[in-house]
Image (tube, rainbow, N blue to C red):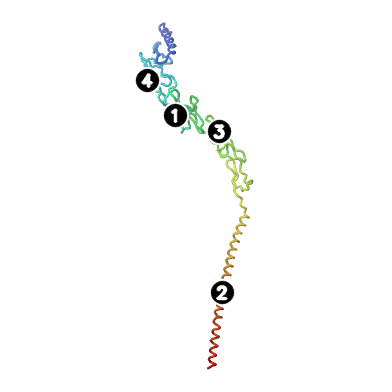
């Protein structure tokens, strides 16, 4: 039970506290109240050296603590630091960094009175929410597998939803729909590989065996015809050469025969005359 003196001091403290709320901290009076052996400070004060000093406002810090003769001296937080509430701190808090390499980006920049607010980058899901509607940790969205399509794209607060492709369709897992298999027969092509849910059918131009054989036989006949033509030409050319040689030989003999006859005539004529 409080004594009458303690009760009076308590009443005085409450009265001064209500009055102090109407003044700025820099002009606030130091109020120190002892109840028994304990020290109780006003919510807008902080305790230091067994004294109650006025707190510095949000966005600042304590430069010099108050004394019996002067109030608390404060300094504003420098860039990259902040304090969100009235405080008796000697140092401001460092602003949070939103690391792009971790999948985070800045949603709201840091100021003297508030920390940075981060959010997931595109393609990432928030797995650890922070204060001020921000995000502290993320992971990549789920990737759909071949044979599945993206049924619902992922967002910062929800993961990607995948669904399987139906028969006759396919997807590599990166599209929002499944595509129909190519119908090779309709295109006049030959199907070499059947399609499945993760890959399309493979087609190529049809090459019938009969056509290949016909082309091959035709080439052989052309070659034989060329060889035969060359042989005939060579044969007649050689025959012509032989014929010319024969004619030349006969002509040469014909030229020699009259001369011999003439010589014989003169021989016999000489013998007869003698």
Return the x and y of residue 25 as percentages of the image width and height. Answer: 41, 15
Q: Helix or strand or loop: what does disc 4 sit on?
A: strand
- How far apart are the two marked residues, 4 and 3, measured between alpha carbons? 52 Å
- Against 24, is 211 above or below? below
Q: Earlier in the sequence, mark 2 or mark 1?
A: 1
Tell me the crowding category of disc 1: few under 14, some 14 to 19, or many 20 or more residues within 10 angstroms, Cα based.
some
Q: Earlier in the sequence, mark 2 or mark 3?
A: 3
Name the residue beneath numbered marker 3: 153
- How far apart are the two marked residues, 2 and 1, measured between alpha carbons? 108 Å
Q: Earlier in the sequence, mark 1 or mark 4?
A: 4
Q: How many marks can you see?
A: 4
Q: Helix or strand or loop: what does disc 1 sit on?
A: loop
Which image quadrant for residue 178? top right
Q: Check the image and name the residue furthest to the bottom.
A: 274
Q: Is residue 266 left or right of residue 86?
A: right
Query: Quick check: marks 2 and 1 in contact, CB under 8 Å?
Result: no
- How far apart are the two marked residues, 2 and 3, measured between alpha carbons? 96 Å
Query: Quick check: marks 2 and 3 in contact, CB under 8 Å?
Result: no
Q: Is residue 37 left or right of residue 138?
A: left
- Against 100, is 194 above or below? below
2 vs 4, front mark: 2
2 vs 1, front mark: 2
Return the x and y of residue 117 as percentages of the image width and height. Answer: 47, 27
Mark drawn on residue 42: none
- How far apart are the two marked residues, 2 and 4, measured between alpha carbons? 132 Å
Residue located 44% across and 29% down the image = 97
Name the residue beneath numbered marker 2: 244
Return the x and y of residue 251 as percentages of the image width and height. Answer: 56, 78
- How far apart are the two marked residues, 1 and 3, measured between alpha carbons? 28 Å
4 vs 3, front mark: 4
Q: Earlier in the sequence, mark 2 or mark 4?
A: 4
Mark drawn on residue 97: 1
């Amino acid at each position: 039970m409080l004594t009458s003196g303690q009760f009076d001091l308590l009443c005085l403290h409450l009265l001064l506290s209500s009055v102090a709320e109407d003044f700025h901290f820099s002009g606030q009076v130091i109020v120190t109240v002892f109840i028994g052996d304990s020290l109780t400070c006003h919510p807008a004060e902080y305790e230091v050296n067994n004294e109650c000093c006025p707190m510095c406002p949000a966005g600042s810090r304590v430069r010099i603590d108050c004394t019996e003769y002067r109030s608390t001296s404060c300094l504003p937080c420098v860039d990259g630091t902040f304090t969100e509430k009235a405080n008796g701190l000697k140092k401001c808090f460092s602003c949070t960094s939103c690391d792009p390499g971790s999948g985070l980006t800045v949603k709201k920049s840091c100021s003297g009175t508030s920390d940075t607010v981060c959010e997931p980058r595109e393609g990432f899901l928030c797995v650890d929410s922070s204060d001020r509607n921000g995000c502290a940790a993320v992971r990549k969205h789920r990737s759909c597998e071949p044979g599945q399509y993206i049924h619902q794209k992922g967002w910062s607060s929800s993961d990607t939803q995948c669904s399987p492709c139906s028969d006759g369709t396919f997807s590599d897992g990166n599209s929002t729909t499944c595509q129909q298999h190519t119908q090779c027969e309709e295109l006049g092509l030959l199907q070499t590989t059947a399609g499945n849910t993760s890959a399309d059918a493979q087609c190529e131009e049809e090459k019938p065996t009969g056509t290949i054989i016909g082309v091959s036989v035709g080439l052989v006949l052309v070659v034989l015809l060329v060889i035969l033509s060359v042989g005939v030409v060579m044969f007649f050319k050689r025959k012509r050469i032989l014929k010319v040689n024969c004619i030349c030989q006969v002509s040469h003999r014909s030229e020699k025969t009259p001369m011999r006859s003439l010589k014989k005539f003169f021989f016999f004529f000489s013998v007869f005359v003698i």
